[in-house]
Amino acid sequence: MPYVEVKLPIAAPVEAAWRAVTRLEDYADYMDNVESVTVHGESGGKRVSEWSVLLKGSVLEWVEEDELDEETRTMRFDQTSGDLDRFTGYWRVEPQDDGTSLVIFCVDFEIGIPLLADMLNPVATKALRENSEQMLRAIEKRLVVS
């Protein structure tokens, strides 16, 4: 199963970075590759979010369950329906010794076309890594400007 991990140090306090990461409904306002995110029914650190994201000129859509752990500043997600067979991972915000933050995004995914997996997985991995890096840089820019 393909795996992507992206890390970006951000010159912002951990609380601000965590707030930016977990405010999914704001992503489309400042991330070019995110068309929309709608958050449904948040309760007890769990919620459902519906996504529409541009990935290399195509629209990728899915619904995921998100679980927020405020103590470890980790937001786990697991696709419940959508364009991929599997899409699961987490966002984490870690404090750094200098008062800044390290934002980490990790995802395991499965396209769901076994006969083409050897050809499609490397392309999808590269595209997903680039999209993830763009998302992290957009969070960084939003926090540095704020």
Image (tube, grey):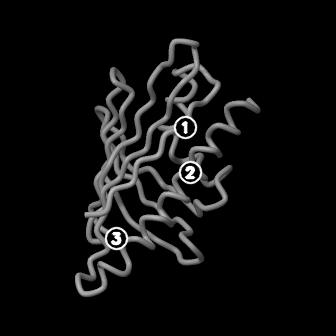
Task: Check the image and report above or below for 121 versus 31.
Answer: below
Q: Are marks 2 and 3 in contact (CB under 8 Å)?
A: no
Residue kind at label 1, given as amino acid type:
Leu
Residue 58, horizontal then vertical, whole percent? 54, 77
Local secondary structure at mark 1? strand
Task: Please identify, in this view, whether the residue under mark 1 or under mark 3 is nearer the observer.
Answer: 1
Q: Say which residue label 3 marks.
A: 82
Please tell me which residue lies in front, 136 or 60.
Answer: 136
Distance between the Cα atoms at labels 2 and 3? 22 Å
- Mark with earlier residue (2, 3): 3
- Mark with earlier residue (1, 3): 1
| Residue at x 48% of width, y 19% of height | 95
Q: Say which residue label 1 marks.
A: 8
Q: Quadrant of the N terminus?
A: bottom left
Question: Would you call the spot at circle 3 few (<14 residues within 10 Å), some (14-19), or many (20 or more)?
Answer: some
Local secondary structure at mark 2? helix
